[in-house]
Structure formats: C-alpha cells, structure tokens
Amino acid sequence: MTPLVWLCKRETLRVSKLWTQTVLAPVVSSMLFILVFGLSLGGRIKQVGHVDYDVFIVPGLITMAMAQAAYANNASTIFQARFDRYVNDVLSAPMRPWQMTLGYTVGGLVRALAIGLSLLVLGLVLVHVPVRHPFELAVAMALGLTLFASLGLVVGIYAEVWDHTTFIQNIVILPLTFVGGVFYSVHVLPSPWEELSHFNPIFYLVNAVRYGFLGESDVSIWLSLGVIAVLAVPVYAWSQWLFSTGRRLKD
Amino acid sequence: MYRDHPALKLSGLTKRYGDGTLALEDFDLEIPAGAFFGLLGPNGAGKTTLISAVCNLLRITDGEIAVFGQPHDSLEARSWVGLAEQDINLDRFLTVRETLTYHGGYWGMRDPEERADELIEAFGLTHKRDTRAPRLSGGQRRRLLLARALMHRPRLVIFDEPTAGVDFELRQELWRYLRGLHEAGTTILLTTHYLEEAEELCDEIALIRDGRLIARDNAEGLRSHFGVERLQDVYVKAMAS
C-alpha cells in the first residue's frame, strides 16, 4: 500500500502547493455567484418551491465548483505528467495499475472537497444553508466526484494538446452545468426544455446534492443517484483500463 | 539467489510502433549480473526503445523480458530496476528532496528521507535540496535524475546517455560515481554516443543498428574482430556493414 499512499500524497501536495489557483480561485468565484445571483436576484425571486432563492442556488454552485475542480485537476495533473514525461516515474514503479488509477484520482477528490467544505462554511455563514440529508449528500458527492475526477484522467490521458482538456471543460461540462438546474428548478422551463433537461447528467448530480442540502429535488433522489452511479462506474473503469493496458500512456 | 540469473534477458523482443516503424526485431540479449554493459548505436537504432521496454514504459509487440529471472512487468522485477532517462523528466512541482523521497515512496521504501539526504550529499545538491526542479541548472538536473534512479538501491541501473550535454568536469565526476556503483556490485546498462565513455567504463559492449544486434564483445575483442585499432573504427565499420 505504501506506493499508493505516496502517490496520493504527491497529488495532494500539488493541490496544496498551488492552493491559490486550485482552491482559493474557485471558492472566490462561487462566492461571487452567491453574492451576485443570490443576493441581487434574491430580491426579485423570493422563493423556489419552499426555499429562498439565495439558499436554493448554493447546492448547485457547490456542485458546479466541485465537479469542475475534480475534472480540471486530474486532466491537468496527468496531462502535465505525460507532457513532461515524469509520469514514467510512476509507470515504471512497482505499483499495481489500480493503485495508479486511485492515486491519480485522489488529487481531484481532495481539491474538490477542499472547495466544497470552504463553500459549505461560506454558505452556512452567508445564507444559513441547511444540510437535511447528510448521507444522501455524501453518496451523491462521492459518485459525482468519482465521475468527474475519472473523466479528467481519461481526457488528460487522451489529450494531445492542452486545449483538448480545456475544450471538454468549456464546451461540454460548463454549459451542461449551467443548464443543469444550478440557478433554477427545471419545472419553470417550458416544454421541451424541461424534458430535455432530463438527458443532462449534471441535472441529476445537482438535484441529488440539492436534496442532500435542502431536502428538495426536481426528481427522485434514488433516480439521481442511480444515473450518477451508472455514469461514474464505467468512466472510472475506463480510466482503470487505460492504466492497466498502458494505452495512450505507453507508446 | 538473484545473481544466479542474468540481470537482463531479452528473448525475441520485437517492437513495432503504431505508425509501422519496426524499432526492434526478434532481439535477443543477455546481460550477466554484475556487468557494466554498454549499448552503442546511432540515433534510431532502438536503444531507447529497448530500455523503455525493460522499464515497462512501452507495450512490446512480441518477445519476453526477464530481470534477474523474473518477468519484467512483475512488481519484484520493477523494484530491482532503476532508470535515468535521456531526457530530463523531473516533476516540476517537487523540490530536490521531494523528488527523491517521493520516488522512494513509489518504490515502497518505508523511510526514504534518510536515503534521499545521503544521495543529495553524494551528488552535491545539498544547497539545492529545497529547490524545485525547474529552478536547477542543467548539470544539477542531470545529477538529480541519476540520484533518483539510484534512490531505491536497484540491482540493475539503466543510464540512457547520462553524460549527454554535460561539461567535462561533471562527466568525470559521473564516471567516478558509476565506477563506484559497479564495484559495489550493481549491474549497469549504459547507452552512450561517446565511444571513449563506453571503452573507459564498460566491460562489454553491444553494437545495435536498425533494431538488431550487430556485434557484442569487450572493446579489445571488438577491435580484433573488426581488424581495427580504435573503437571509433569498429563503430564506423559495424554501422556501414
């Protein structure tokens, strides 16, 4: 187990050494979202369901920040390691492929959790966001972060240039997050947009996390958790397959 | 006893890259335990491919590789091999000391700090121990790369052109270190473009061209076989034949 622990430590060290970029920046931008959207629009949109608007958006913003951080961290760490070829130090080590996969995944999880906990504290202080179902919240977070951390690894391994990793983030993840119900309940959308939202996987993650915090969701919590799990397991397996076979990592 | 087996045994090793390039073809090689073995050949001969195959850095097309009798991809064999690659591939986020301790950790060392400090001193990096790799000079990076390869006390160390681009003084210093390592019983596989380096250090030399073994002997044997007086002439003849 020692090699796995050291790889986890290395990935965590990278996050902590770059904490202003990896943790502080996303926390500040999410806080600005809470202030700008929540406190300004909150004056016009009083409640969504039974929840004040400034409280309603907090779970979605936390989800958005954490998912993006888990993805971006792992895409960049593995791409950089490949590009500078210091990944060879890990690939040639007496380490099993599952240890490599897990070790590289952990960095994204740690970064996302650091952001999530910071935003939770801010959410408690600024808008008194409740945590009504901590177990469901923990499961949703675990599955969601596994999905995005693994996706980051997969993209970082396939990417040939840096732009490939940012393309997925800016053209796929970010738009899907914005239309995934972070700032609104999909029930307010006209047809067919409400129905189409159900094809967006991030919609289920946002709603699962929102259920964990507020006890309210646009869909069943079990459906949400099921959809996230159905996506997270194969993407993690994909990243594991890449390390097991050496495809794209070894010539 | 691990010394009962050859340090490295390649049997029918073949590597064809995705673009169709055949880098190694049915390559056989056996390096005895404790040898200081040189691998010479022009760029593109297959030296780095061979090394990468041994160190599990590429997927081989065919053949077998054994390190002290164990399959090269087993955890045991991996733990016995140290590699200093031709290109400087140091983790840009780690300091000198972290580079060594993390490497030791990846290789399962329980308390790598003491060994890291020992190597930092041996390679004259004491005043740079808390400096990150990108801030080191070229020579310091090269030293760190070699120290990293030795961190986990490997039985077989592979140096891929370790003195490429280093100044005369550092080259002499590295030669002294490599000799000491060899005298301590470590098997060394060295690739180099400097023929005098191979002659000075290696007790056996293999010449490789287009992924095939052309000749193998000690420097004297090679000169005698090719009927020339200098190793440079052996190289020229072997590569032209």
Image (spheres, rainbow, N blue to C red):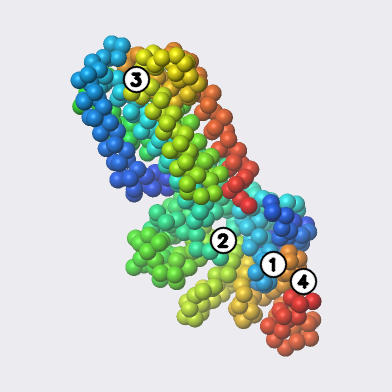
Of badges 1 and 2, the one in the foreground is 1
Identified at 34% across, 60% down, the residue is B130
Residue B107 visible at all: no
Amino acid type indicated by mark 1: Ala
From what the image shows, is residue B90 above or below residue A145? Answer: below
State whether discs 3 and 1 lie on one chain: no
Number of residues whose C-alpha sits closer than 10 Å to that of mark 1, classed few (under 14), some (14–19) or many (20 or more) = some
State whether discs 1 and 2 lie on one chain: yes
Find residue A184 and name its label.
Answer: 3
Between the residue at mark 3 and the residue at mark 2, the CA separation in whole angstroms equals 55 Å
Determine the secondary structure under disc 2: strand
Amino acid type indicated by mark 3: Tyr
Which residue appears farthest toward the bottom when viewing the image? B229
Protein chain holding label 1: B
Which comes sooner in the sequence, label 1 or label 2?
Answer: 1
Amino acid type indicated by mark 4: Ile
Between the residue at mark 3 and the residue at mark 1, the CA separation in whole angstroms equals 62 Å
* Quarter-of-image position of residue B19: bottom right
Identified at 29% across, 20% down, the residue is A56
Labels 4 and 1 touching (C-beta < 8 A): no
Give the left or right position of residue A242, taking residue B92 as reference. Answer: right
Labels 3 and 1 touching (C-beta < 8 A): no
Residue hosting label 4: B214
Amino acid type indicated by mark 2: Leu
Labels 2 and 4 touching (C-beta < 8 A): no
Of badges 4 and 1, the one in the foreground is 1
Residue hosting label 1: B45
